[in-house]
Image (cartoon, rainbow, N blue to C red):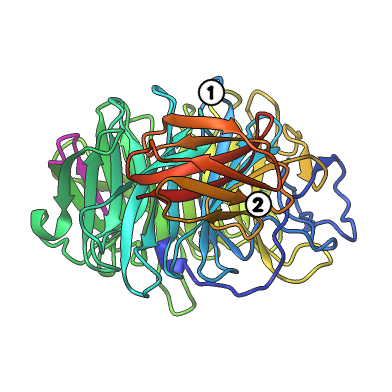
Amino acid sequence: MRQLLLLAAMAASVHVSAQKYSPVTGTTCGVDYARPCSGGMIPDGYSYTDYGSGTYYLQDPFPMDVHGTDGTTRNEIYSVGIENGVTPNRSYFIRRNATTGQITQIIQWSNFGQQAGTRSVTYDNTNDRLFIAGVEATSNISGSYNGYFKSFSYTFNLFNNTYYLPLASAVPVDILVDAAGDVYVLCHRNGLNSGFIVYKYTFNGILLGTLSSASSITGFSTASPWSMEYDNSYNNIYICGRLGNAGFICGIDQSLSVLGTGTDISSSAGYTSIDMDNNGNLFAVGSASSPGGNYASWAQWDISTSTYSINYTGSEPTAGIIADILIDPNNRHTVLVNDKITEITSSNTLDMITNAGTLPTSVGSYLGHLHRNVTDGSYVVSGLGLGFGAGPNWPTEYVAKFNYPGGPTGSLGANPWIGYENKSTTTISSLEKDNSIVLHPNPATNRLSIDLKGNDADNYRIINNMGQMVSRGYMLAPRATIDVSMLQPGQYYLQLLNNTQTVNTQTFTKQ
């Protein structure tokens, strides 16, 4: 889940290019490979870059969220984040096979401003829909931003609809979908400590309602939200974050009416994540402040009445911020903390030894995000790694898959994934200006000329903002001209293909 306070840009200058991956089953560090080589257990599978060869997918990535398709036939893992190594920075979306871990698609697009980026991703299993939420600059003028959520088209493999939030200053931190298929976007109202806003939409962007803590919840005008959780049993939504020197929770129903609130001073630095346990209690994790820095803290909440109350709290002074929590059907409380994936035990202690799995070297605890695969009980971790391999000490996004003791495939380290590094073709779709392809004029009135500059595309599709294909045809390199006179005014996607394989996606405007 999202840790918005920690968005510090890390500068680097590296080259972005397509990479190839091959199976890697050993655990020995190679000179040119970025592998986790610290002591303890290593992740079962991972996907990131090769520093030794100088090839990269992402420039200074900052991972923000990970989510999966939870046992559907699609069987995929999605991760999103921000690339801070380009100016202006850009968002990225990575699509992986949930069984093998292999990357199948990367989409990158400009945010037009350094404070912008994609924050969250969610998948609607019932209706097979994928959504992301984030913020982008309205122009290249610093300080002018808009929050949004986008829907993904599996037909065309791109984000074909963008819905901007009513309040320009609202910054999304989380997104989820309820059982009816409606979309909820949780936002900072106007920066940190300004309260939170929840927007409710239909899947196709019709606003159904708004809840503002500043005007609707007494004492919550300075709350800072971190994340939210959907309760499938009662169709309620729970929000957590920081309020002053305390963690807070807030429950709302599908009509955006407040069910109850509570604060916890033992988590004085705030809550970062919440989940529902098997007994109908809400479990919140985060950190407490101390002179030596933040340390891990948690609490179980009774939410059976409108007066929320704490059943018990816990802490571990030797551990840092707990970044995320997931509770499985066996009531196991799996968490990310420090460089480990581990659990809070039934005796209310944080297990840092017995069942703890070690993440790649130098992974900050606050940079991790969890997803649980329903089909096999494994856990997928997305995060930021620093200083891998023999190359420069740049950060890189990684995704690793873990099994836990008692799961259907055995104990941690049973290798449910093969690690992939640098040897198998990946499709990269770009939604920003690509210097290798030139469209002109843009905006276009009657004809749109395409200078392919050696690109191997031989046909095209034009897609509108509803995800509908409105035109298609063939091209002869190195230049082509398309008749767009019949299109209605607006923004369109030009999808360039070689046979049926997407080569590149560009945007243009029809006047």
Q: Is there any visible trace of residue 236 in the rendered image? A: yes
Is 38 in front, or is 205? 205
When asked about the image quadrant of residue 307, the answer is top left
- Image x and y of residue 456, in percent: 73, 42
Q: Amino acid at mark 2?
A: Tyr
Q: Residues within 10 Å of mark 2 (few under 14, many from 20)?
A: many
Is 147 in front, or is 379? 147
- Image x and y of residue 452, in percent: 66, 50
Q: What residue does disc 2 label?
A: 398
Residue lying at the far bottom of the rendered structure: 291
Let me know if residue 234 is in the magenta part: no
Is 144 in front, or is 400? 144
When asked about the image quadrant of residue 404, the answer is top right
Relative placement, left or right, of 295 versus 423 is left
Give the label on residue 71, or none.
1
When asked about the image quadrant of residue 84, the answer is bottom right
Relative placement, left or right, of 193 versus 463 is left
Residue lying at the far top of the rendered structure: 73
- The reply to whether the C-beta atoms of the residues labelled 2 and 1 are less than 8 Å apart is no
Q: Amino acid at mark 1?
A: Gly
Among numbered discs 2 and 1, the one appearing first in the sequence: 1
Q: Residues within 10 Å of mark 1 (few under 14, many from 20)?
A: some
User: Is 127 rendered above or below residue 172?
Assistant: above
Query: Which SS class for mark 1?
Result: loop
**What span is in magenta?**
247-257
Is 137 in front, or is 286? 137
User: Is 353 rendered above or below residue 306?
Assistant: below
- Image x and y of residue 123, in percent: 44, 34
- Image x and y of residue 204, in percent: 30, 34
User: Is 156 rendered above or below residue 117?
Assistant: above
Residue at x 58% of width, y 60% of height: 338
Query: Which SS class for mark 2?
Result: strand
